[in-house]
Amino acid sequence: MAIGVAVGGGLFTFVYAKGGSYMTNDPRACANCHIMQDHYDAWVKSSHRSVASCNDCHTPAGPVSKYVVKATNGWHHSFAFTMGGYPVAIRARPESRAVVEANCRRC
């Protein structure tokens, strides 16, 4: 019974949070989270949108490492939002900052 409740709750949360959209390369998925809307709007208005999507800069290039980073970030984001520990002014974690810096060198 407890396993069923956990699986059901997890599936509901995944669907409610539009979890499948995070497996795409669509930048609109990043704006699913209300705190990212301003960042997405700025990206849409910038010339940068014609050369890079969110994943181009914020995740590693390899398919496995990309989804490991997406899953790790998703876990941290969902935990922080659920527990109320997400700051209004977001900052990249050191691991995420390192990915962005490495990707910027490629451009």
Image (cartoon, rainbow, N blue to C red):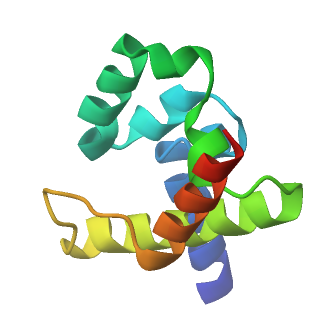
Instruction: Name the residue at the right extreme.
Output: 63
Up the image or down, 41 lies above or below 98; here it is above
Q: Is residue 20 left or right of residue 38?
A: right
For the N terminus, give its image quadrant.
Answer: bottom right
Up the image or down, 56 lies above or below 11; here it is above
Q: How many numbered circles does the render carry? A: 0
For the C terminus, give its image quadrant.
Answer: top right
Query: Can residue 8 be seen at all in this image of the molecule?
Result: no
Query: Can residue 59 be seen at all in this image of the molecule?
Result: yes
Q: Examine the image and state in which quarter residue 42 appears.
A: top left
Q: Residue at x 25, y 76 (%)?
A: 83
Q: Residue at x 52, y 76 (%)?
A: 95
User: Residue 2 location in percent, x, y?
Assistant: 59, 87
User: Residue 62 location in percent, x, y?
Assistant: 85, 57
Up the image or down, 4 lies above or below 8; here it is below
In front: 4, or 22? 22
User: Residue 19 location in percent, x, y?
Assistant: 59, 48
In front: 21, or 95? 95
Q: Examine the image and state in which quarter residue 35 appears.
A: top left
Q: Residue at x 50, y 27 (%)?
A: 28
Q: Is residue 78 left or right of residue 91?
A: right
Up the image or down, 60 lies above or below 86; here it is above
